[in-house]
Amino acid sequence: MTEDAALLSCCGLRKTFGKDAGLVRAVDGVDLDVAAGETVAIMGPSGCGKSTLLHLLGGLDRPSGGEVRLAGSRVDQMSERALARLRQDSVGFVFQAFHLMDELTAVENVELPALLAGRPARVARQRATGLIERVGLAERAGFMPAALSGGQRQRVAIARALAGEPLVILADEPTGNLDSAATLEVLRLFESLHAAGQTLVVVTHDSRIAATAPSGPWPTWTGGHEQAPAGRPAGGA
Ligand code: ADP
Ligand code: MG
């Protein structure tokens, strides 16, 4: 794939933490291209830098070196204000621990980003209701997160991530807290998003997830060991 074709890409991406004897090369020279509409799995053992890489790709953290591009814009060079806008408008994050607001209902969690972005309440609610339906939870729109199963909570979190119509969804071990039935639920949802053309980057340490997708195995990027065979073990958690 040429660089122009990539919706999301990074080149020579590095992130270090600490210094001297405590230096950790969490991400060490990663090149990655994700085309529009592609679903890519990022795999590798715990501590190999998957979360750090995802944070750098989505503008949650700044790299120590290298470039990140999303839709032609240099994420690594953005001001704080531009990064905030990027996270609001262009990137949808999904986390292992869901990170829903416990005191809000499912549909309120989904409409919150639009309300914070200043959208009219009626528009935000209408869109959130549509998204709750899209993730198969229409009957549970008014439920509190505590009354939902893990798989249902993660589907609410995915609906919330979709609220801003992001260019890309970045998911960090989205099935890591789920049993196998709920894992399947979430995978089916990702597959339907993929079928609808959503660009997805999914971090997982479970090889079955990337390998068993109904649409065929997801292209997989594994841990960056090619670039950093020596630095990786020292950086391992
Ligand atoms: P993974 O998600 O693959 O388990 P992480 O990206 O969380 O790996 O972490 C990669 C390495 O960077 C680990 O050694 C971890 O301890 C270290 N690390 C991650 N975040 C920080 C931080 N904020 N401060 C110091 N070290 C960190
Ligand atoms: Mg992680």
Image (cartoon, grey):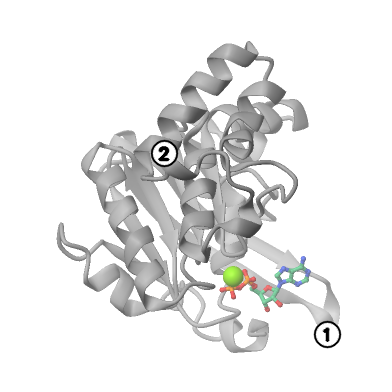
What is the x, y in percent for residue 108?
A: 63, 34
Q: Residue 159: tell me if it is visible.
A: yes
- Mark 2, residue position: 138
Quarter of the image where the C terminus is located: bottom right
Q: Is residue 222 left or right of residue 152?
A: left
Q: Nearer the viewer, mark 1 or mark 2?
A: 2
Numbered label tally: 2
Residue 4 at x, y = what percent?
A: 32, 33
The correct choice, above or below, for 152 with respect to 194 in the image is: below
Of residue 227 and residue 69, the one placed in the foreground of this image is: 69
Whether residue 72 appears in this view of the structure is no
The answer to whether 78 appears left or right of 212 in the picture is right
Tag 1 secondary structure: helix
Quarter residue 217 falls in: bottom left
Q: Whole-percent x and y of residue 128?
A: 51, 29
Residue 21, which numbered label?
1
Q: Amino acid at mark 1?
A: Ala
The residue at the point 60 percent across, 82 percent down is: 231
Residue closest to the eye, 104 or 58: 104
From the Cβ of disc 2, is ligand 2 less than 8 Å away? no
Q: Residues within 10 Å of mark 2 (few under 14, many from 20)?
A: some
Q: Is residue 218 left or right of residue 237?
A: left
Position of residue 102 measured from the top left corner of the image (x, y, whole percent): 72, 51
Give the residue at x 66% y 31%.
112
Q: Earlier in the sequence, mark 1 or mark 2?
A: 1
